[in-house]
Amino acid sequence: MNDNPQDSRRPCVMGSSRSPSSSWDAAVAAEITGALAETYRDDMGISHVDGGNMPQRDAVVAILEKILEILFPGYTGRHLVTRAALEFTTGDLVNAVYHGLAEQVRRALAYRCQVECCGGCDCVRQADDAVIALLRRLPALRGLLKSDVQAALDGDPATSSTDEIIIAYPGLKAIAVHRVAHELYRAGIPLIPRVMSEYAHTVTGIDINPGAQIGGSFFIDHGTGVVIGETAILGESVKIYQGVTLGALSFPKDACGRLIKGAKRHPNIEDRVTIYAGATILGDITVGHDSVVGGNVWLTESVEPFSRITNAKPDLSIKQRRP
Amino acid sequence: MNDNPQDSRRPCVMGSSRSPSSSWDAAVAAEITGALAETYRDDMGISHVDGGNMPQRDAVVAILEKILEILFPGYTGRHLVTRAALEFTTGDLVNAVYHGLAEQVRRALAYRCQVECCGGCDCVRQADDAVIALLRRLPALRGLLKSDVQAALDGDPATSSTDEIIIAYPGLKAIAVHRVAHELYRAGIPLIPRVMSEYAHTVTGIDINPGAQIGGSFFIDHGTGVVIGETAILGESVKIYQGVTLGALSFPKDACGRLIKGAKRHPNIEDRVTIYAGATILGDITVGHDSVVGGNVWLTESVEPFSRITNAKPDLSIKQRRP
Amino acid sequence: MNDNPQDSRRPCVMGSSRSPSSSWDAAVAAEITGALAETYRDDMGISHVDGGNMPQRDAVVAILEKILEILFPGYTGRHLVTRAALEFTTGDLVNAVYHGLAEQVRRALAYRCQVECCGGCDCVRQADDAVIALLRRLPALRGLLKSDVQAALDGDPATSSTDEIIIAYPGLKAIAVHRVAHELYRAGIPLIPRVMSEYAHTVTGIDINPGAQIGGSFFIDHGTGVVIGETAILGESVKIYQGVTLGALSFPKDACGRLIKGAKRHPNIEDRVTIYAGATILGDITVGHDSVVGGNVWLTESVEPFSRITNAKPDLSIKQRRP
């Protein structure tokens, strides 16, 4: 009870929403609810009412984590993976991923149908094909990811353990999620790939658009603040550090001045290029193979293979302050 | 059992904490517990014992997610929102938010009362008023958020779907949470707004102080590393990219050299200003409307409207290395 | 059912994976499972089959959160901490942390034994010693953390509440986790310290290698993008802002060109140094005490005490665009 706040023996925290001083009642609740419902009725473009079943972010993330268990068996430690039970454990995961992901992909396709009023498209078949194609690609993705783990081991003096890399490194998680999301992006699946990549962005600080094409033996160290755009193309054995942006310099527009969606606007990074922390590379340019881009470099023009690009020695001012 | 670690047929992992080689016992536990309790007794300023019920971070976050469901109905996909059930679904959420948030706000206010020994203040009434005022603002916040979603659609060539923006874009989530937290900040509620904004910071990498004043049609692309300070003021249709800081150049101090809390120290960004990745704008300065601040620019002075600020062409050194 | 996609009265979302158009069956599942199992059999270096019980990331994180409850009693608000029940509450937590962490540390040690075929080592004893030593250090860590909280209060004009700092500030969370992880790093425990530090990295965007040596009264403001390397050494009362890197300039290699793991390669930051946002300090250099490193500075040479290092006034180009 807090109806007598002056009574210092009674800490006001004891008050409850049912205390006399509460002004919340059915009328207030109804008034606010009505006002909100009103804003749902007009088409404000940010309501999703009677809109069919959207894909569910939480469900997509749970399925994605299962896919990562398939890609790195035994590393979550959630259950001991034994050679004896291997087929069973894996089979269960594969089935669970198929059914869960097919459902979410169907939702995404069906929702697009509604929006685009395409009338009839076989969302079930399309979802099936995309999910089965993804599952068939998993062994090949494991090969790519093995090369990524090796690249991290070769590139980081702070670790001597592939297990540490697989269990703990954000860069590897971002790459693994990207390799999965990219398969669905290539299959033309809406929404789901971006939900996956933004989940990786949330847990790693690394923002790789599902459209980016990335070769094997890719290593991202530290990674926070890395941005890789939709139409970027990276070769083999590329190494990048935290805060690197592979972005767009300007956005192509159509005659009406509207952005042209999906146009090529991000860099091409050839094999064995290293890009140090904070470098920004913008536009549809090419960084030739075996080049090194120094920290904080701002690059908007193509460079030849074997280039070493650095900022001119920074003009530092170093003053002594009187102790 | 691992009491004989030399026995190589027995992997040492089999050992258990009850094995003879364990030195943990009641005495050790009591000794450590006693030493810790000792540090709790003295006022180390980082203990919270007998301190009444603090707000609970987890509870605040759960309520915040419910508020986001009210602001973007149907997007979590947690339940299908139908026009028929709209009033009921919304009414339930509104009631749940009121009761949950009022409780947390009361805890925050009551705790401040204790700290400041204010004796008697009607925390229940104050909490009620603040929460009800927030709920009454939600329809207006939906209007603002609709303009933010449209700004993202217009500004990002990588998407053509408002649904993708609402479900997946970290920038929109950070803005939505900020618009809610800012209402409670304006109402003078302690702790809760910052808990909300740091939750958004955790999941998006975007750090917007609840005090910042931000106009409509606000778009943050990628977002990781963005910092917007407590006294920053942003106009309409501002667009910023990852790594942008709107910060303080120096901190006003009082006669005793103590920081003056809350003094105006962050930039004013006028309407239709675009700020590219990594730019740093510091101090209580004004960037005139329709200006463009280039990537990595370091700006500490006001600029006129329609300014285009860029770093002088970077003095790059490009050397060829012998293949 | 969606076998007749042309029937526009039937939204295709109604289709299910059991609909005629689904091509998923036992044969497909078996084929994919077999292909995956095949890749597990060869040693791809990213499988962990029959590999004993790895440490479990989720369990380590849950234990870490308990340790934080011991370090900051009463702040999670998960349960009211009363002076009366203090010994009991604390004793329960201490026991839970001992048993849980000892198990995880044993897994990590035992796994390393397998990998290195060390034959017999007393993993149980080693784990016990390390965990008990950590628990014995907690009172001292509380002393350090109190100084860190005070440093945040003195350094940030946006707050006047130690409670807000403890409940909400990512910088403090990153420091607290680091101080715990560093104890296990010093004890030579594999995997666990890095799992802890990468958890902090995920929730704060601050990447502090467990090896870094950091003095008291340490304050990180905002923090996203901060990177502190394994062999960095920081004195007392160091203050750093978002996007600061204390990294390596080059990696020492052995005669065979392989990276030498663990070699000293990161900066030494002496007492009372402040490093502003985006500064990059690389290599085994020393920044003398009471120095100030300006925003975006790129520093690769040692500087004397009381230095003030800033970039030469940026050569900005400010053009007016015709309204």
Image (spheres, coloured by chain):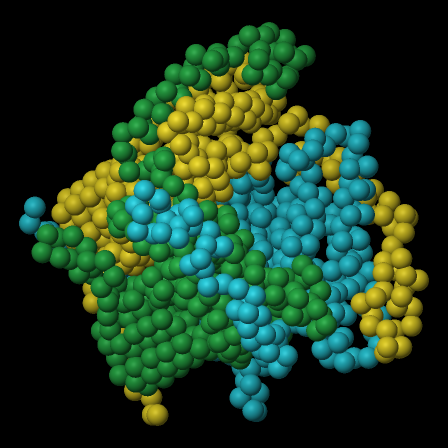
Chain colours: A yellow, B cyan, C green
Q: Position of residue C220 (x, y in %)?
A: 46, 69
Q: Is residue C219 above or below residue A34?
A: below
Q: Quadrant of the C terminus of chain A?
A: bottom left
**Do we see residue A125 in this rendering?**
yes
- Identified at 23% across, 38% down, the residue is A236
Q: Position of residue A59 (x, y in %)?
A: 57, 34
Q: Nearer the viewer, residue A115 or A136?
A: A136
- Identified at 37% across, 20% down, the residue is C34
Q: Quadrant of residue C126?
A: bottom left
Q: Quadrant of residue A229?
A: top left
Q: Quadrant of the N terminus of chain A?
A: bottom right
Describe residue C268's horizontal placement relative to residue C2 as left or right: left
Q: Position of residue A21 (x, y in %)?
A: 90, 64
Q: Nearer the viewer, residue B5 or C225?
A: B5
Q: Is residue C245 above or below residue A163?
A: below
Q: Position of residue B175 (x, y in %)?
A: 59, 52
- Identified at 41% across, 66% down, the residue is C183
Q: Is residue B319 above or below residue A323?
A: above
**Do we see residue A196 in this rendering?**
no
Describe residue C115's horizontal placement relative to residue A289 as left or right: right
Q: Quadrant of residue C293?
A: bottom left
